[in-house]
Image (cartoon, helix red, strand yellow):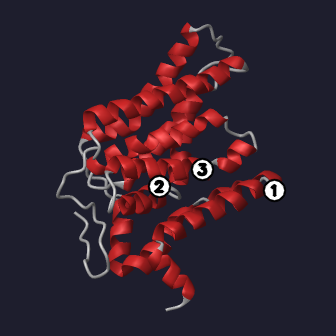
Amino acid sequence: MNPITSFVKRYPQGAFWSIAYLIAGVGFPLSMIYPSELWGFVIWGITLGGALVTGVVDGKAGLKTYFSRIIRVRAGIQWYAIALLTPFVLASIAFGLNILTGAKVSGQLPALGDAVVLFVLFLLTNAGEEPGFRGFSLPHFMKTRSAFTASLAVGVLHAIWHLPLFIAGQMPLVDFLQPLCGAFLFTWIFNNTNGSVFLAMLLHASNDVAGGFFGSVFTGTGATDFHYYHAGAFVILVILLRVFAGRELGRKPEADLDVRTADQPAIAR
């Protein structure tokens, strides 16, 4: 066994996040220096990285499970509603609080048609992220940790992944609370939809659209305050999930969410 394969097998999370951070640390700065729409494809390295590590660690059976999560669309309609609407509820709360505390609206809300187009574009982009973050890293953390602790781990690592954007000033620092706190919502939905990464992609795309939809009408201090209210809404959401969904965030005691090794083949349910 060569040293790289040995490292990946021994430290699958370390291998995966090394790939993710390499993409962020190199791809984001270069995209700012040499702007191009083609940089959007770089993000797909995260999904490919998750597949690569899965193939090394869990073999063909693991890859079957990894890719099956992406197309698991069978879930209760309520989970589709939660994934699609929760981000808009959080953003609208931030919008309302901002208005109530004196922020002035300096523009119009984007047209619904524009929001739909953005949603589709974000969905395609997030297909390059969520299979790695939620389809690989989350279930591997949940092998040895509670769902709440696993969510915290993924949330912290995902927030750090955005560091180049924070440094470049493309995202306000308070926005690190979105990937950190949002991780718990992702896990709750993941655990209640048989490990569906497709629902995670919908949630991610909806959140990207919602923040821009409601936040784009503010400028200056109003825009800054919106980000703080939005972050606060996410923090409250985590508290509610902990109280009402518990430390396992909906995970059934007997469920392992398809986290298997090559000698324990997984069958997508």
Identify the mark at residue 24; answer none if there is no mark. none
> Is 13 displayed left or right of 269 in the figure?
right
Q: Position of residue 145 (x, y in %)?
A: 34, 56
The vertical placement of 18 against 111, above or below, is: below
In the rendered image, which residue does mark 2 sit on?
A: 130
Q: Position of residue 185 (x, y in %)?
A: 38, 41
Identity of the residue drawn at 45% across and 78% down: 9
In the rendered image, which residue does mark 3 sit on?
A: 160
| In-front residue for pair 32/256 | 256
Query: As shown in the figure, which amino acid type bears the numbered disc 1?
Result: Tyr
Which residue is most to the bottom? 1
3 or 2: tag closer to the N-terminus? 2
- Examine the image and state in which quarter residue 57 appears: bottom left
> Is 152 displayed left or right of 194 in the figure?
right
Q: Which of marks 3 and 2 is in front?
A: 3
Q: Are marks 2 and 1 in contact (CB under 8 Å)?
A: no
| In-front residue for pair 95/182 | 182
C-alpha separation, residue under disc 3 versus residue under disc 1: 23 Å
In the rendered image, which residue does mark 1 sit on?
A: 34
Category of crowding for the residue at label 1, using alpha-carbon neighbours closer than 10 angstroms: few (below 14), some (14–19), many (at least 20): few
